[in-house]
Image: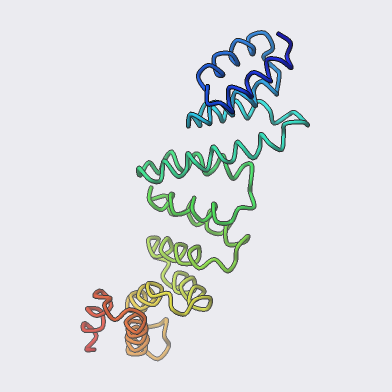
Amino acid sequence: MSAEEILAQLRCDLEEGRYERGIAACRLALQEDPNNPALHFEHGSLLRALHRDEEALAAFSRCLESQVYRGRARQQLLNCLRDLIELKETIGEYYEAVIYYRRYLAVEPENGRYWINLGVCLVAQGAMAAALEAFDRGLRVEPRNCVGWFNKGLALVELDRCAEAIEAFDRVLGLEPTFRDAWFHKGQLLLRLPDSFFGLGKALGKHQARECFRRALEIDPNFDEAKRALQGLGG
Protein backbone atom coordinates (compact mmCIF):
# COMPACT_ATOMS: atom_id res chain seq x y z
CA MET A 1 0.00 0.00 0.00
CA SER A 2 1.14 3.55 -0.71
CA ALA A 3 1.54 6.09 2.08
CA GLU A 4 -1.65 7.83 0.90
CA GLU A 5 -3.60 4.56 1.01
CA ILE A 6 -2.30 3.76 4.50
CA LEU A 7 -3.35 7.21 5.76
CA ALA A 8 -6.76 6.88 4.14
CA GLN A 9 -7.24 3.52 5.87
CA LEU A 10 -6.14 4.91 9.23
CA ARG A 11 -8.60 7.81 8.94
CA CYS A 12 -11.33 5.34 8.04
CA ASP A 13 -10.46 3.25 11.13
CA LEU A 14 -10.67 6.40 13.27
CA GLU A 15 -14.03 7.46 11.83
CA GLU A 16 -15.53 3.98 12.19
CA GLY A 17 -14.21 3.34 15.72
CA ARG A 18 -11.69 0.63 14.82
CA TYR A 19 -9.12 2.20 17.09
CA GLU A 20 -7.05 -0.83 18.11
CA ARG A 21 -6.79 -2.03 14.53
CA GLY A 22 -5.75 1.45 13.42
CA ILE A 23 -3.12 1.72 16.15
CA ALA A 24 -1.62 -1.63 15.19
CA ALA A 25 -1.51 -0.66 11.50
CA CYS A 26 -0.04 2.71 12.34
CA ARG A 27 2.78 1.19 14.35
CA LEU A 28 3.65 -1.15 11.51
CA ALA A 29 3.74 1.78 9.11
CA LEU A 30 5.93 3.79 11.49
CA GLN A 31 8.49 0.97 11.52
CA GLU A 32 8.93 1.61 7.80
CA ASP A 33 8.66 5.39 7.97
CA PRO A 34 9.43 6.52 11.55
CA ASN A 35 9.66 10.25 10.80
CA ASN A 36 6.39 10.62 8.91
CA PRO A 37 4.41 13.39 10.71
CA ALA A 38 1.13 12.34 9.11
CA LEU A 39 1.47 8.84 10.57
CA HIS A 40 2.34 10.23 13.99
CA PHE A 41 -0.66 12.54 13.87
CA GLU A 42 -3.07 9.72 12.99
CA HIS A 43 -1.43 7.54 15.64
CA GLY A 44 -2.02 10.25 18.23
CA SER A 45 -5.63 10.71 17.13
CA LEU A 46 -6.33 6.98 17.47
CA LEU A 47 -4.68 6.83 20.89
CA ARG A 48 -6.61 9.87 22.06
CA ALA A 49 -9.88 8.26 20.98
CA LEU A 50 -9.08 5.51 23.53
CA HIS A 51 -8.15 8.10 26.20
CA ARG A 52 -4.53 6.94 26.10
CA ASP A 53 -3.49 10.55 26.45
CA GLU A 54 0.09 10.08 27.64
CA GLU A 55 0.88 7.96 24.60
CA ALA A 56 -0.99 10.43 22.38
CA LEU A 57 1.16 13.25 23.76
CA ALA A 58 4.28 11.52 22.55
CA ALA A 59 2.76 10.99 19.11
CA PHE A 60 1.59 14.59 18.69
CA SER A 61 4.96 15.87 19.92
CA ARG A 62 6.57 14.16 16.91
CA CYS A 63 4.48 16.41 14.59
CA LEU A 64 5.45 19.78 16.01
CA GLU A 65 8.33 20.29 13.58
CA SER A 66 6.06 19.78 10.59
CA GLN A 67 4.73 22.94 8.96
CA VAL A 68 1.70 21.03 7.74
CA TYR A 69 0.77 19.42 11.06
CA ARG A 70 2.20 21.84 13.63
CA GLY A 71 -0.98 23.80 14.32
CA ARG A 72 -3.27 20.78 14.62
CA ALA A 73 -0.72 18.77 16.60
CA ARG A 74 -0.19 21.66 19.02
CA GLN A 75 -3.93 21.92 19.67
CA GLN A 76 -4.31 18.17 20.14
CA LEU A 77 -1.31 18.13 22.47
CA LEU A 78 -2.95 20.87 24.58
CA ASN A 79 -6.22 18.92 24.61
CA CYS A 80 -4.40 15.83 25.89
CA LEU A 81 -2.70 17.82 28.62
CA ARG A 82 -5.99 19.44 29.61
CA ASP A 83 -7.64 16.04 30.03
CA LEU A 84 -4.69 14.66 32.00
CA ILE A 85 -4.73 17.70 34.30
CA GLU A 86 -8.45 17.28 34.94
CA LEU A 87 -7.97 13.58 35.70
CA LYS A 88 -5.07 14.13 38.10
CA GLU A 89 -6.85 16.94 39.95
CA THR A 90 -10.01 14.85 40.27
CA ILE A 91 -8.16 11.99 41.95
CA GLY A 92 -5.98 14.32 44.04
CA GLU A 93 -2.65 13.53 42.37
CA TYR A 94 -1.38 17.10 42.55
CA TYR A 95 2.26 16.23 41.94
CA GLU A 96 1.33 14.76 38.55
CA ALA A 97 -1.05 17.64 37.85
CA VAL A 98 1.80 20.10 38.41
CA ILE A 99 3.93 18.27 35.83
CA TYR A 100 1.17 18.45 33.25
CA TYR A 101 0.40 22.10 34.03
CA ARG A 102 4.04 22.96 33.43
CA ARG A 103 4.06 21.07 30.14
CA TYR A 104 0.88 22.87 29.08
CA LEU A 105 2.23 26.28 30.01
CA ALA A 106 5.49 25.62 28.17
CA VAL A 107 3.35 25.48 25.02
CA GLU A 108 0.71 28.07 26.00
CA PRO A 109 2.40 30.50 28.44
CA GLU A 110 -0.29 33.20 28.20
CA ASN A 111 -3.00 31.09 29.84
CA GLY A 112 -3.44 33.06 33.07
CA ARG A 113 -6.04 30.71 34.52
CA TYR A 114 -3.71 27.73 34.19
CA TRP A 115 -0.88 29.60 35.94
CA ILE A 116 -3.29 30.26 38.80
CA ASN A 117 -4.46 26.65 38.85
CA LEU A 118 -0.81 25.55 38.92
CA GLY A 119 -0.35 27.78 41.95
CA VAL A 120 -3.29 26.11 43.71
CA CYS A 121 -1.75 22.66 43.10
CA LEU A 122 1.60 23.86 44.42
CA VAL A 123 -0.11 25.17 47.57
CA ALA A 124 -1.61 21.69 48.02
CA GLN A 125 1.97 20.34 47.97
CA GLY A 126 3.14 22.96 50.45
CA ALA A 127 5.38 24.66 47.86
CA MET A 128 4.34 28.20 48.78
CA ALA A 129 7.22 30.12 47.18
CA ALA A 130 6.72 28.34 43.85
CA ALA A 131 2.96 28.88 44.18
CA LEU A 132 3.46 32.63 44.57
CA GLU A 133 5.55 32.70 41.40
CA ALA A 134 2.75 30.90 39.55
CA PHE A 135 0.08 33.25 40.93
CA ASP A 136 2.14 36.27 39.91
CA ARG A 137 2.56 34.91 36.37
CA GLY A 138 -1.16 34.30 36.11
CA LEU A 139 -2.13 37.68 37.52
CA ARG A 140 0.13 39.46 35.07
CA VAL A 141 -1.98 37.91 32.32
CA GLU A 142 -5.33 38.21 34.16
CA PRO A 143 -5.01 41.07 36.67
CA ARG A 144 -8.74 41.02 37.41
CA ASN A 145 -8.85 37.34 38.37
CA CYS A 146 -10.35 37.31 41.88
CA VAL A 147 -9.57 33.64 42.45
CA GLY A 148 -5.91 34.30 41.67
CA TRP A 149 -5.65 37.19 44.12
CA PHE A 150 -7.50 35.23 46.80
CA ASN A 151 -5.28 32.17 46.49
CA LYS A 152 -2.20 34.36 46.44
CA GLY A 153 -3.45 35.83 49.71
CA LEU A 154 -3.84 32.36 51.23
CA ALA A 155 -0.29 31.44 50.20
CA LEU A 156 1.04 34.64 51.77
CA VAL A 157 -0.82 33.77 54.99
CA GLU A 158 0.99 30.42 55.07
CA LEU A 159 4.29 32.29 54.76
CA ASP A 160 3.22 34.64 57.58
CA ARG A 161 3.41 37.63 55.25
CA CYS A 162 0.23 39.06 56.71
CA ALA A 163 0.41 42.65 55.47
CA GLU A 164 0.94 41.46 51.88
CA ALA A 165 -1.89 38.97 52.28
CA ILE A 166 -4.24 41.76 53.33
CA GLU A 167 -3.24 43.67 50.20
CA ALA A 168 -4.11 40.61 48.12
CA PHE A 169 -7.51 40.25 49.82
CA ASP A 170 -8.13 43.97 49.29
CA ARG A 171 -7.49 43.44 45.57
CA VAL A 172 -10.14 40.72 45.62
CA LEU A 173 -12.65 42.95 47.38
CA GLY A 174 -11.94 45.83 45.04
CA LEU A 175 -12.91 43.57 42.16
CA GLU A 176 -15.67 41.60 43.88
CA PRO A 177 -17.08 43.19 47.09
CA THR A 178 -19.30 40.15 47.78
CA PHE A 179 -16.36 37.70 48.02
CA ARG A 180 -17.28 36.35 51.44
CA ASP A 181 -14.10 34.48 52.28
CA ALA A 182 -11.88 37.44 51.41
CA TRP A 183 -13.67 39.52 54.07
CA PHE A 184 -13.31 36.69 56.59
CA HIS A 185 -9.61 36.04 56.00
CA LYS A 186 -8.85 39.74 56.02
CA GLY A 187 -10.58 40.00 59.41
CA GLN A 188 -8.54 37.12 60.78
CA LEU A 189 -5.32 38.69 59.58
CA LEU A 190 -6.13 42.07 61.11
CA LEU A 191 -6.19 40.34 64.49
CA ARG A 192 -2.72 38.87 63.91
CA LEU A 193 -0.92 42.06 62.95
CA PRO A 194 1.22 43.90 65.53
CA ASP A 195 -0.04 47.11 67.16
CA SER A 196 2.51 49.17 65.24
CA PHE A 197 0.81 48.28 61.96
CA PHE A 198 -2.27 50.35 62.85
CA GLY A 199 -0.59 53.43 64.27
CA LEU A 200 -3.48 54.11 66.63
CA GLY A 201 -3.14 50.81 68.46
CA LYS A 202 -4.65 47.34 68.47
CA ALA A 203 -8.17 48.62 69.12
CA LEU A 204 -8.29 49.92 65.56
CA GLY A 205 -7.30 46.49 64.24
CA LYS A 206 -10.07 44.83 66.25
CA HIS A 207 -12.58 47.38 65.01
CA GLN A 208 -11.57 46.76 61.39
CA ALA A 209 -11.65 42.99 61.91
CA ARG A 210 -15.13 43.23 63.40
CA GLU A 211 -16.30 45.13 60.33
CA CYS A 212 -14.82 42.46 58.06
CA PHE A 213 -16.67 39.68 59.87
CA ARG A 214 -19.88 41.68 59.70
CA ARG A 215 -19.48 42.18 55.98
CA ALA A 216 -18.95 38.43 55.54
CA LEU A 217 -22.16 37.77 57.48
CA GLU A 218 -24.09 40.28 55.43
CA ILE A 219 -23.13 38.26 52.37
CA ASP A 220 -23.81 34.90 54.05
CA PRO A 221 -25.85 35.05 57.30
CA ASN A 222 -25.17 31.33 57.85
CA PHE A 223 -21.37 31.68 57.81
CA ASP A 224 -20.66 30.02 61.18
CA GLU A 225 -16.93 30.79 61.28
CA ALA A 226 -17.63 34.50 60.89
CA LYS A 227 -20.31 34.30 63.59
CA ARG A 228 -17.85 32.73 66.03
CA ALA A 229 -15.14 35.24 65.15
CA LEU A 230 -17.52 38.15 65.72
CA GLN A 231 -18.73 36.69 69.02
CA GLY A 232 -15.11 36.38 70.11
CA LEU A 233 -14.77 40.13 69.62
CA GLY A 234 -17.88 40.88 71.63
CA GLY A 235 -20.33 40.97 68.70
The residue lying furthest to the front in this view is 16
88 vs 168, nearest the viewer: 88
Vertical side of 10 occupied by 131: above or below: below
150 vs 76, nearest the viewer: 76
Vertical side of 141 occupied by 121: above or below: above
Q: Is residue 198 left or right of residue 8?
A: left
- Count of marks, rendered view: 0
Q: Position of residue 43 (x, y in %)?
A: 60, 23
Q: Is residue 226 left or right of residue 98?
A: left
28 vs 142, nearest the viewer: 28
Q: Which residue shows up at 39% across the image and 65% down it? A: 157
The quadrant of the picture occupied by the C terminus is bottom left
Which image quadrant is residue 206 in? Answer: bottom left
Vertical side of 108 occupied by 148: above or below: below
Q: Position of residue 19 (x, y in %)?
A: 52, 23
Which image quadrant is residue 76 in? Answer: top right
The residue lying furthest to the right in this view is 67
Q: Is residue 150 left or right of residue 107?
A: left
Q: Which residue shows up at 52% across the image and 26% down it? A: 17
Q: Which residue shows up at 64% across the image and 52% down it? A: 110
100 vs 28, nearest the viewer: 28
Q: Is residue 227 left or right of residue 34?
A: left
Q: Position of residue 218 (x, y in %)?
A: 34, 84
**How has the structure been colored for display?**
rainbow
Q: Position of residue 234 (x, y in %)?
A: 22, 89
The quadrant of the picture occupied by the N terminus is top right
Q: Which residue shows up at 58% across the image and 13% down it? A: 25
